[in-house]
Image: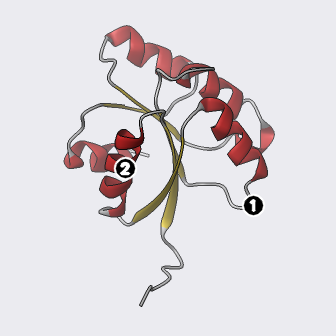
Amino acid sequence: MDVLVLNMKQALIVDDAPTAVEILKRSLHGLDIQAHGVNSGEDALLYLAKADQLPDYVFMDVMMPGIDGYETTEQLLGKEKTSHLPVIIYTTLRREEDKVKATSVGAVGFLSKPFAQPALKACLQSL
């Protein structure tokens, strides 16, 4: 029997790699966060524009076909409906300039792939 958890946090994962989406979904589920995945920045913007209930967190990959994660984050945070959403950049990029760019587009967190569960938990607790 499925049990509905009324106050479970929600997350949107934006990543073109299905395996990465599934790994993050499982990790978030372990933290009592239910996640939905989309595979492009364009799909994320469309999903959020149509959403009746916005997620509590957005996990944004950087390198994706079409608009990249930085541009998607700027567009997302530039819209009144979604301007308050906490965006966490999660990427294989590790250079300092990547972290600076994430902050400059409005992301509130930066998580490197692959990540460990304690790093994910710490990132979320800092928000």
Q: Residues within 10 Å of mark 1 (few under 14, many from 20)?
A: few
The tag earlier along the polypeptide, 1 or 2, is 2
Residue type highlighted by circle 1: Asp
Q: Residue 125: image x %, image y %?
A: 35, 51
To which residue does mark 2 refer? 22
To which residue does mark 1 refer? 52
**Residue at the spot 55% in from the left edge and 21% down from the top edge:** 65
Secondary structure, mark 2, is: helix
**Left or right, 78 with reference to 57:** right
**Residue projecting furthest to the front:** 18
Q: Are marks 1 and 2 in contact (CB under 8 Å)?
A: no
**Residue at the spot 32% in from the left edge and 23% down from the top edge:** 92
Q: Residues within 10 Å of mark 2 (few under 14, many from 20)?
A: some
Using the image, determine if residue 114 lies above or below residue 64.
Answer: below
Quick one: 8 or 64, which is closer to the camera?
Answer: 64
**Residue at the spot 31% in from the left edge and 11% down from the top edge:** 95
**Residue at the spot 39% in from the left edge and 9% down from the top edge:** 97
